[in-house]
């Protein structure tokens, strides 16, 4: 099994990152470069989190070999005997318990992890500080060519990269002025790593302080159906306002596009840029703008003022942003509407005596085998109305205990005698028994919880409309790459903080232990003494203040005072928004109910009377055959028969018109025979025939 665990986790983590990117990104519409950069950033960060427990267990095994080698016990180790227990073990191994130091199942051979960490770390740092900022500007650029986009990205990042060069140049000048420092390349590299980790730790504590409180509280609130439904009404009101604003913004941008499209004709040199902009517009707007583009006038015939290429680049950027925002709010509204309807169904079914969950709007798709045999309406009722509530409460209590343990350990992890960090106590107890499986599971659960608190905050925060991670493939390229930058900057200090919590970082614990392969590539933090023994130790204590502020919702109250409406139960504005959201949900339910009733009436009509259009076509074909077989009749009889057939056709046509009036919504009579509409076509003017017939046949489309 040597190295097999590493290979398995590398593959599993890749598919995990791919799944998350598929949930938030759009593989069909977004650029391949954006998707690849985001996938690589997420993959490397998740890989660090999953591989670090294996590094810890391998380091403990190497430390065991070093301890036994110092006692001249030899490096060859054998599995523990069957009668070995934790009771006869001690902190310092002796010859009697030598066999307890055995190779873990997930042991990674020497020399692999240092190279692995070096490749992963420096690749992630190049992504977050160099490539992803450039790719962000490239994706947001409204340029019409690759060269134009690259030029725009370089100009936007000139200040960003110039700051790095200024800091690095100042550092070199400082070293040159003070020759007593004698900083080598290794020490300069360590200073750069320390500076990056310091910036990441500063942001890490802020995000973790919010997540440690908000995650347990969110699960506790999820168990309160009434509270969750009221908050959904509040979100519906705010989202409808944002949706209306996005539609209005899209209308304004489309109006600008229409004016520019009408001013620049087909033979104008800038027309190709207009066509590129039009392809980014919604289909209905493309059709409206295409109807008035029938002329091929020469652009030199009229002395008009045409927009410049720079103006078109700016318009192109506005179109991309407006369309993305409009699509996102539209999809989010449908998802939120479905959540509100489901919560209302849960509230109604809680008082049901039949213990059968009934949906207000059953799914039109046929039920699968899982819904038919396992997740039946009875099982769904017990889960939604009874068990789910208690499961969320139990999960909230467990997460609260984890949060308390993290806060306590963050404030006491620098104390090694006595050991006050709870996670360090758990790992040292397992280390005495050399229970590698327990060590790896404890490390994985701890670091997974820390990552959940930090990463979930990254997925929840929203910086106006510039950074917003929306599920169901509605996240734009800028937000995807910004999240990749945050992950790459937060993950290394998060892992160092975790190693400090379990006393595996000698720079913080000041213990003579075998360093992990991960800390070995970070270099000795003693180069910057005030950071290693000051900032890294005392700054995490600030998490206590942040958790208290989050518990009392001080940030929410401050945003509410600044005019950003937040959900607060004791606010009058919140109550008004809740009432407004409730009315919006009712309106949407009535609209959906009318559509469903129309579908039911249409289905019943077809089942009862069949399809009148097919009956009329059959009768028309039989009448035509009768005309062909009556070739032996006289001319007068033929004339009389033709007149009779026309009158009969008129009667049938009247019946068809009555059936059309009684037909449910969305009835379409475009497929009627041409001879049945022969007399009707003479009533319309020549140029108005298509529009008039279209409006006449679809008279109920807008109902």
Image (tube, grey):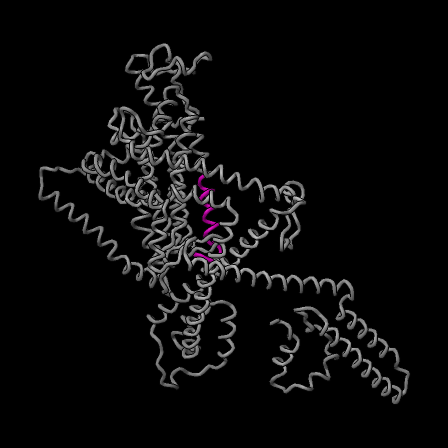
Q: Nearer the viewer, residue 623 or 81?
A: 81
Q: Residue at x 75, y 79 (%)?
A: 676
User: In the image, is residue 18 part of the stretch drawn in magenta?
Assistant: yes
Q: Quadrant of the C terminus?
A: bottom right
The tally of labels here is 0
Q: Quadrant of the N terminus?
A: top left
In percent of width and height, residue 651 lies at 80, 80
Q: Nearer the viewer, residue 72 or 212?
A: 212
Q: Is residue 152 left or right of residue 581?
A: left
Q: Is residue 497 shown above or below 365?
A: above
Q: Nearer the viewer, residue 287 or 297?
A: 287
User: In the image, is residue 255 part of the stretch drawn in magenta?
Assistant: no
The single residue placed furthest to the top in the displayed view is 96
Q: Is residue 92 shown above or below 224?
A: above
Q: Residue at x 58, y 44 (%)?
A: 385
Q: Nearer the viewer, residue 212 or 330?
A: 212
Q: Residue at x 55, y 41 (%)?
A: 388
Q: Is residue 56 shown above or below 143?
A: above
Q: Quadrant location of residue 201?
A: top left
In percent of width and height, residue 578 lies at 48, 58
User: Is any atom of residue 44 visible in this view?
Assistant: no
Q: Is residue 692 left or right of residue 647?
A: left
Per the rendered image, the range of residues in magenta is 13-30
The single residue placed furthest to the bottom in the displayed view is 636
- Overall secondary structure of the magenta stretch? helix
In percent of width and height, residue 462 lies at 38, 54
Q: Quadrant location of residue 690?
A: bottom right
User: Is any atom of residue 643 visible in this view?
Assistant: yes
């Amino acid at each position: 099994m040597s190295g097999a665990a590493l290979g398995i986790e590398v593959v599993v983590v890749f598919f995990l990152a791919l799944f998350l990117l598929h949930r938030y990104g759009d593989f069909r519409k977004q650029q391949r470069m954006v998707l690849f950069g985001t996938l690589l950033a997420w993959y490397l960060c998740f890989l660090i989190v999953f591989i670090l427990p294996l590094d810890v267990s391998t380091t403990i095994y190497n430390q065991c070999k070093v301890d036994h080698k110092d006692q001249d016990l030899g490096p060859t180790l054998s599995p523990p005997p069957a009668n070995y227990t934790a009771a006869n073990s001690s902190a310092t191994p002796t010859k009697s318990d030598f066999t307890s130091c055995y190779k873990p199942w997930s042991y990674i051979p020497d020399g692999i992890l240092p190279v692995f960490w070096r490749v992963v770390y420096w690749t992630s740092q190049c992504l977050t500080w160099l490539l992803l900022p450039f790719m962000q500007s490239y994706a947001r650029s409204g340029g019409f060519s690759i060269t134009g986009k690259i030029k725009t990205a370089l100009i936007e990042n000139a200040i960003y990269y110039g700051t790095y060069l200024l800091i690095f140049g100042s550092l070199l000048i400082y070293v040159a002025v003070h020759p007593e420092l004698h900083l080598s390349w290794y020490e300069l590299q360590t200073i750069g790593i320390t500076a990056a980790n310091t910036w990441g730790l500063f942001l890490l504590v802020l995000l973790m302080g919010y997540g440690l409180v908000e995650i347990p509280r969110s699960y506790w609130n999820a168990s309160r159906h009434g509270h969750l439904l009221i908050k959904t009404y509040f979100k519906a009101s705010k989202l409808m306002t944002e949706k209306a604003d996005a539609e209005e913004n899209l209308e304004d941008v489309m109006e600008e596009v229409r004016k520019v499209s009408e001013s620049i004709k087909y033979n104008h040199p800038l027309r190709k840029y207009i066509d590129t902009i039009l392809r980014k517009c919604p289909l209905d707007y493309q059709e409206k703008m295409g109807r008035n583009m029938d002329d091929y006038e020469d652009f030199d015939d009229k002395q008009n003022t045409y927009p410049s290429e720079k103006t078109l680049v700016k318009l192109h950027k506005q179109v991309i942003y407006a369309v993305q925002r409009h699509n996102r709010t539209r999809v989010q509204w449908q998802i939120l509407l479905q959540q509100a309807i489901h919560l209302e169904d849960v509230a109604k079914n809680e008082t049901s005596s039949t213990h059968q969950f009934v949906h207000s709007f059953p799914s039109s798709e046929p039920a699968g085998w899982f819904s038919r045999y396992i997740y039946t309406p009875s099982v769904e009722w017990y889960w939604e109305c009874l068990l789910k509530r208690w499961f969320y409460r139990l999960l909230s209590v467990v997460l609260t205990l984890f949060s308390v343990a993290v806060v306590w350990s963050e404030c006491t992890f620098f104390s090694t005698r006595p050991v006050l960090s709870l996670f360090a106590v758990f790992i040292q107890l397992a280390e005495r028994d050399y229970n590698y499986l327990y060590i790896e599971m404890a490390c994985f659960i701890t670091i997974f919880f820390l990552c959940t608190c930090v990463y979930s905050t990254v997925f929840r925060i929203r910086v106006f409309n510039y950074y917003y991670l929306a599920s169901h493939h509605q996240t734009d390229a800028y937000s995807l790459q910004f999240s990749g930058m945050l992950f790459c900057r937060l993950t290394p200090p998060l892992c160092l903080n975790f190693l400090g919590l379990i006393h595996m970082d000698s720079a913080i614990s000041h213990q003579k232990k075998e360093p992990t392969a991960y800390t070995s590539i970070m270099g000795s933090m003693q180069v910057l003494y005030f950071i290693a023994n000051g900032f890294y130790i005392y700054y995490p204590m600030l998490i206590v203040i942040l958790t208290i502020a989050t518990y009392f919702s001080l940030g929410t109250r401050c945003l509410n005072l600044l005019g950003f409406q937040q959900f607060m139960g004791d606010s009058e504005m919140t109550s008004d928004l809740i009432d407004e959201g409730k009315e919006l949900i009712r309106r949407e339910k009535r609209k959906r109910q009318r559509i469903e009733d129309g579908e039911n009436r249409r289905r019943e009509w077809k089942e009862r009377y069949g399809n009148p259009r097919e009956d009329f076509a059959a009768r028309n074909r039989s009448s035509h055959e009768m005309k062909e077989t009556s070739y032996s009749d006289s001319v007068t009889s033929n004339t009389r028969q033709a007149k009779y057939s026309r009158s009969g056709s008129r009667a049938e046509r009247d019946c068809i018109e009555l059936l059309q009036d009684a037909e449910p919504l969305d009835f379409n009579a475009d497929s009627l025979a041409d001879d049945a509409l022969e007399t009707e076509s003479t009533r319309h003017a020549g140029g108005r025939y298509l529009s008039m017939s279209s409006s006449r046949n679809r008279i109920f489309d807008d109902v």
